[in-house]
Amino acid sequence: MNKEFLYTEITNGLASQIRNGLLKPGDKLPSVRNLCHEHQISMNTAKRVFLELESQSLIESKPQSGYFVSPSLSVKLPLPEISRPSLIANNNEPDELISTVYENMGKSNLTLFSIAIPSGDLLPQAKLKKEIINATRELKSGGAEYEELQGNLKLRRMVAQRSLSWGGNFNENDLITTNGGMNALSFCLMALGKPGDTIAIESPCYPGILQLATGLGLKVLELPTHPAHGIEIEALKKAIPDIDICLLIPNFNTPLGSCMSDEHKKEVVKLLAENGIPLIEDDVYGDIYFGAHRPKCCKSFDKEGNVLYCSSISKTLAPGYRVGWIAPGKYKDKILKLKLLHSTSSISIVNEAVANFLKTGRYDKHLQQLRRTLQSNYQNYVQTIVESFPEGTKISRPQGGLSLWIEFDKTIQTRKLYDLAIKQDISIAPGRMFSLQDQFENCMRLCIGLPWSETIQEKLKQVGVLAKTI
Amino acid sequence: MNKEFLYTEITNGLASQIRNGLLKPGDKLPSVRNLCHEHQISMNTAKRVFLELESQSLIESKPQSGYFVSPSLSVKLPLPEISRPSLIANNNEPDELISTVYENMGKSNLTLFSIAIPSGDLLPQAKLKKEIINATRELKSGGAEYEELQGNLKLRRMVAQRSLSWGGNFNENDLITTNGGMNALSFCLMALGKPGDTIAIESPCYPGILQLATGLGLKVLELPTHPAHGIEIEALKKAIPDIDICLLIPNFNTPLGSCMSDEHKKEVVKLLAENGIPLIEDDVYGDIYFGAHRPKCCKSFDKEGNVLYCSSISKTLAPGYRVGWIAPGKYKDKILKLKLLHSTSSISIVNEAVANFLKTGRYDKHLQQLRRTLQSNYQNYVQTIVESFPEGTKISRPQGGLSLWIEFDKTIQTRKLYDLAIKQDISIAPGRMFSLQDQFENCMRLCIGLPWSETIQEKLKQVGVLAKTI
């Protein structure tokens, strides 16, 4: 077996055991020699495994004694509560709050804990630039003319190819490109919903989805959602008679970071298909898993074309390129028509550049690096939160993605915390943004996509200190 | 006065006189010497004026006698009729026809008379490529990160600056960028209309607008439209009580090529404002005028922010870049929100590249060249149509744009003509596509954006020959 592959497998395996609690804080890890023996790897590879785990703050070495699971995680913070939204469709948009948060984002020198995208420093900018230049050379008319309505064939092929390795199993004809992930969701909602229809979603939910749905005149039904395992199937079952569409972020959901298990996905797909309710699946975070493998998607279990799978490269490669796609199942014709009417065609140059980037295999290397960084960021965030946040703080345990969900004691209003933090040039995302009901007022989302540094650590501490003053 | 400016003024002035019929076919033009004297220009400049007019097929030289208005235009074809659609909102979409025409466009070796965009050969591809490369260098993160929601500031500034010269009078804060012109129209319709609302449009009308409006659940009211002067104000007045939105292409409309006069625009803007009906203005063809000056837009006369002005560079520079904009007047907040929800941000690289291209002044040179080519194409089309099309053919007299509207004798069904032509690898746009009612079945639109050649001439002749067989 490939040496590099083994290295990654073993590292991720141990990391998962630590995060899952199989290896507990303070536990001793196997010696370098034992690891070699157990996995039939060289001393050097074994050492690299430990160094990597150490760089992720998961383990610490003690002189003469070996490696131990980091004690910094020993003070385990509890998980946030399972959400219990009102099960009547609500439309109490936190408009004013969202406007405030968005408007302030324009401030310079702001520490942006409030958005769920990777910082520009984590993107392979130089290589992407080269691909843009290549694209202008390779494309007919340098990309100045319209491309095929369904989208760049090379990109669709690459996305389809990659999906085979994790059970997406698309082919190039299943896919339609869009101007990023939100554009993909927007086409799906326009294709499926008419004003007055009800859409079921996770709670808390990404504000863009809430606004898009209400903007299209849909009624929004928020369903109880477990902070680690996703939407509650029982609640969904009960809601079936009332809903027309369901939209989920099954993998590393924002803001919760929850990830549905394969069994759970399968069950949801079956339930919705049996009841003729289409499922829109937003999988933009699927590629940034912290574990050993990329999780499957709901679409993997879709036999009837009932799942509209949406994804993009905005969370991994280049948000500004607006390159996304839909595998719309049996709704392909509808989506194609909407794309023609609302945007005519995708933008050849960026799509061609991304296709070529995926083709070189650089994407995998980049993803590996990005995942490692985010995972280590996550550890660092947790450590700082443990040290500096008020007693009673609960946090989510994402197994991937860009978001950390914080639940404070009921007395700590994050709307107030926002006002205090922004004065110190720190932007957080108050929990109320993630619902159309009055809930999550003591919660907030933090983005872990900023490169870790003393400054970031300081700013994060400051949030904790400010929270204590409320 | 600038010599080059004088040359252009005089050339365009004479061209207009010929097209307007002030100078009639066979009329003698002033001698080179007289022209020099009259305008205080050099012999060389005067000669260039005549050479240019000759290259546009507007005049011919007769040895020893001087220049004369081309006799080829002497057989003047009449204008198409003013449209008289049913004044009840209809929704009889020519779905099957549109699908056929669009699907066949994928055929290779097709002569595409059916679309209204300039051929790739007429675009400044090499210079645009350079600007793309520059953009990746100049932009923060090479364009990989989101840009400001309202859109690239440099582009908005350039569009605003340019608008001052022709009465658009935007400033950079009035403008929001979009992914092309259709995306601009889509945002406007979503911002203003709800299902069941009625929208008034010109008849015939661009199929994309018809489909977009019906797709959003709007009722479409087609209004009588003059082939040269645009929508009939009397009909609009009568329709006022029934309509919620009005959408017009006032300058070099597709398919008619009509252009509303300033007075007409002013009156329409006033009428709609008085009745609280917003006007969406699509001005994508405004820059490709054949006359001496760019026409104003309806927005020039808008005092109350009631006009939502939409434009793009898709008809002049690079359709595939999808760079467009809206000056939404008092609807700015609504449009910004829609942009955030449905597309998050524009694509920095192409917007920056276009901004830089506009800034160099190359755009003006390119436009000059493009206008000259289209104008000369137009003359060549007319000449071929006069020679080869069936008796009774009527054609529009566009003063700019990319479309020529043909009206045959009632017995000639362009649906049939389409079927015959496509077998010979020629694609035309049958008139029925441009309405939601059963009208224009003996009409078609031809694109004049293909570079003129013997092949194109031959193909156009073939259309005429086929029409005679019906």
Image (cartoon, coloured by chain):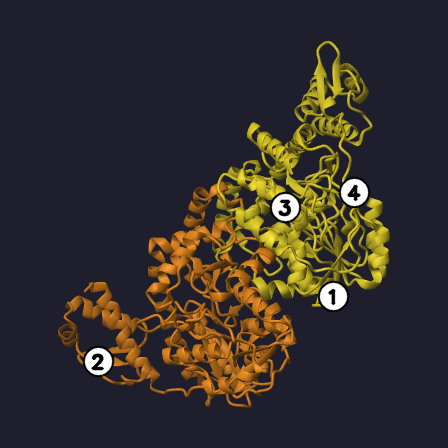
Chain colours: A yellow, B orange
Front-most of residues A21 and B305: B305
Q: Nearer the viewer, residue A370 or A443?
A: A443
Q: Which mark is residue B29?
A: 2
Q: Which residue is mark 3?
A: A415
Disc sitting over residue A81 in the figure: 4
Numbered disc 4: secondary structure: loop
Position in image of residue A128 (x %, y %) = 53, 41
Viewer-proximal residue, A454 or B39?
Answer: A454
Q: Is residue B441 above or below residue B99?
A: below
Confirm or deny contact between disc 4 and disc 1 (CB under 8 A): no
Amino acid on which the number 4 mark rests in the picture? Glu
Which disc number belongs to residue A197? 1
Same chain shared by disc 4 and disc 3: yes
Same chain check for tags 1 and 2: no
- Considering every residue shown, the one lying at the far top of the view is A64
Q: How packed is label 3: few (under 14 Cα within 10 Å), some, or many (20 or more)?
A: many
The verdict on a common chain for dots 1 and 3 is: yes
